[in-house]
Image (cartoon, helix red, strand yellow):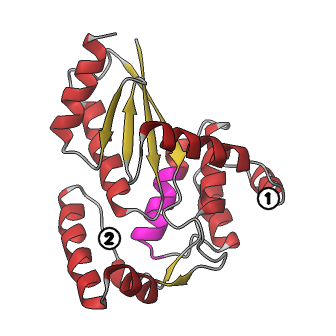
Amino acid sequence: MNLAVDVISDVICPWCYIGKRRLEKAIAVDTLDGQHDVQVRWHPFQLNPTMPKEGISRKEYRTRKFGSWERSLELDANVIAVGESEGIRFAFDQIERTPNTLDAHRLIWLADHHGCQDAVVEALFRAYFSDALDIGNRQTLIDVVVEAGLALPVVEAMLGSDDGMDAIATAREMSQRYGVDGVPFFIIDQKIALSGAQPTDVFVETLGQAISTS
């Protein structure tokens, strides 16, 4: 039996990375493993759709968003602690820029057509959050996604075109349809929605519910 999980997210959302890890753990539990083919597909959500192409200083962005840099550091500390419990190292102190994620989302869309979407999503999360790379920089993006499995000529051709923009618009319509105002957001088998990086046992219960009602 196939079970579809659609994930609406942004690659600069730390809770999306945490949610990814928790979903993976839920899929791997004995009650699901080997009995059901869970197909995860990633859809774009731009947290900052008006972000300049070159991005901005993370300190400037976070101070503006949360009122003070001290408040940002408090929030980062909380995410770092949760990340450690999920095996994720967040290197917030090394991240210099908050990037524009449009091209990253287009490359995730491209990866879906080349059978390596999960690997590309994982690589982008890791590049930004753990390696503190500027994934708004075109060459950095190319290096990350090629290492994750996309062919260089295919990547360069897409980045030189408008391919993937339709997918951005389609995902925006999906978000509006489900009333998404924050990410991550998970849609299980097109009938059960979960908002936020829920605990692993919540994902297990929800996947089981979707299976039992299919």
Residue 169: image location, x then y, percent: 65, 46
According to the picture, the residue beneath numbered tag 2 turns out to be 90
Residue plotted at (67% across, 49% down): 150
Q: Main secondary structure of the magenta part?
A: helix
> In what quadrant of the picture does the C terminus appear?
top left
Q: Which residue is mark 1?
A: 156
Residue 114, quarter of picture: top right
Crowdedness of circle 1 by 10 Å Cα count: few (<14), some, many (20+)? few
Q: Secondary structure at mark 2?
A: loop
Residue type pointed to by label 2: Phe
Residue 35's place in the image compared with 106, above or below, is above
- Across and down, in percent, residue 102 comes to 63, 61
Q: Is residue 128 magenta?
A: yes
Residue at image position (32%, 18%) is 34
Query: Considering the numbered disc 1 on the image, is that residue within a helix, a strand or a loop?
Result: helix
Q: The N terminus appears in which quarter of the rendering?
A: top left
Report the span colored magenta: 121-132
The Cα–Cα distance between marks 1 and 2, rounded to whole angstroms, is 29 Å
